Image (spheres, rainbow, N blue to C red):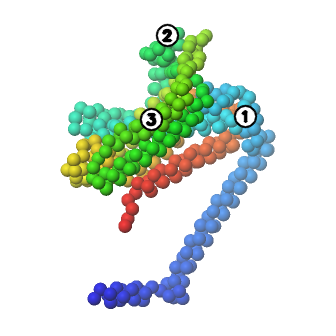
Amino acid sequence: MTEPTQMEARAERGARRPSPGSLGARIRNIVKTRGFVSQAVFLIVVAILAVVVWRTAEENLSRLAVKSGYSFLLEAAPFELGETIIPYRAGDTYLRAFAVGVLNTVKVAVLGIVLSTVLGLFIALGQLSASPALSRLCRGYVELVRNVPLLLQLIFWHTFLTKSLPSVRQAFSPIDGIFLTNRGLYLPFPEPDPSHPWIGLAALLGIALAVAVVKLDRRALLREGRTRPTFRRAAIALVLPPILVFLAFGAPLTWDVPALKGFNFRGGMDISPEFAAMLLGLTVYTAAFNAEIFRAGIQSVPKGQSEAGLALGLSKGQVMRMIVLPLALRIIIPPMANSYLNLTKESSLAVAIGYPEIVRVANITLAETSQAIECITIIMAIYLTLSLLTAAFLNWVNARAALVER
């Protein structure tokens, strides 16, 4: 009885499907062709408008005797930048100055994304805590921070760090070799050694081993139904390779300790108040939004999933880590991607407190060269590239976390 029914259904669908020469098929072909033609015409119109705008701007700039083009990027930049990841000094090219700005933007954005995610998760768990005091405190944090403009928070943190902390001569030193002043935080830093690249490779190997341990333990849990000390095993896999390589090279570790020389500290590593204020502001502000995303995602998981995990003998922490959060990620990742994109673009507000990110470098370059269109297009291209890369990575993560339909 089942076979004839299926054959009849196929025959009926085939009868309903229009033949290639039927009126319905011709209409669909016409609609598809018109859609393609309309999109092509739209792209051509946009390209023509872009060329017209560019030619008009070029003619007006030449009429006003204003230099145009991007050749200025290879000229010497006469200004210094307060904070650089790569070596830079006055006299280097504008292109190198823009590279410094891009790296500073990426540095504050990546660190802000990581720290705001961790802080947001803790705030979300605090809101869901059984303790009324902790829950209300975390809720108050979210409501307060979300309703204060980010620019105002950045100015507050910068003013606090530069005005409230002691001067260089009266630096606060909680531990020998660490100095906190209104010019920044100065920390000891290891001196370069030929073994450091090998230790770095060993650290990457440790990260790969830790990820493998987590995946194997998760598969064992699903297959055998028994838990393993995943955190301890992953921590050992993470730190063991670099420690072994470090010991194999004879434990070469010499610290470059900052010392007061003249009007400031020299040596070691320093964290400027501008960078610290920017990172604090972005982290605290974005974490409030991330906390709401985490809270909504966790509360969307049915309580039956948690009860089932507890019935299997898992602790509350294991239930949250192994069941609730993996299920909630499918809801958390899409809005979190938007939050990360906003954080990256909001890093442009650093120009208000003097942190040398891409917008500040472009503003200084504009003042020196008067090439406004070029500087603005460079800013737009850089932020567009960063946003597309961030979105592509998070789309990949979202695809990996999505449920696979069978």
Give the residue at x 66% y 30%: 87
Q: Using the image as rendered, state which of residue 130 and residue 403 is in the foreground.
A: 403
Q: Tag 1 or tag 2, which sits nearer the N-term?
A: 1
Q: Residues within 10 Å of mark 2 (few under 14, many from 20)?
A: few
Callout 3: helix, strand or loop? helix
Label 1 close to label 3 by CB (< 8 Å): no
Q: Residues within 10 Å of mark 3 (few under 14, many from 20)?
A: some
- Amino acid at the residue labelled 2: Gln
Residue 295 visible in image? no
Please name which of the two marks, 1 or 3, marks the residue nearer to the observer: 3
> In the picture, which quadrant includes the N terminus?
bottom left
Residue 373 point in image, percent of width and height: 68, 43
Disc 1 is placed on an element classified as loop
Which residue appears at 35% of the width and 48% of the height? 217
Name which residue type carries label 3.
Val
Q: Residue at x 31, y 51 (%)?
A: 221
In the image, is 20 to the left or to the right of 134? right
**Residue 132: x, y in percent?**
22, 35
From the top left corner, tell me how far across and down residue 159 is, in percent: 48, 22
Mark carried by residue 170: 2
Q: Earlier in the sequence, mark 2 or mark 3?
A: 2
The residue under label 3 is: 239
- Nearer to us in this view, 15 or 235: 235
**Do the numbered discs 2 and 1 sit on residues whose CB atoms are within 8 Å?**
no
Front residue (pair 143, 169): 169
Question: Position of 115 compared to 375: left or right?
Answer: left
Label 1 CA crowd tier, 10 Å (few <14, some 14–19, many 20+): some
Quote the CA–CA distance across marks 2 and 3.
38 Å
Q: Secondary structure at mark 2?
A: loop
Q: Looking at the image, is mark 2 or mark 3 nearer the viewer?
A: 3
In three-dimensional space, the C-alpha distance between marks 2 and 1, rounded to whole angstroms, equals 38 Å
Residue 93 circle label: 1
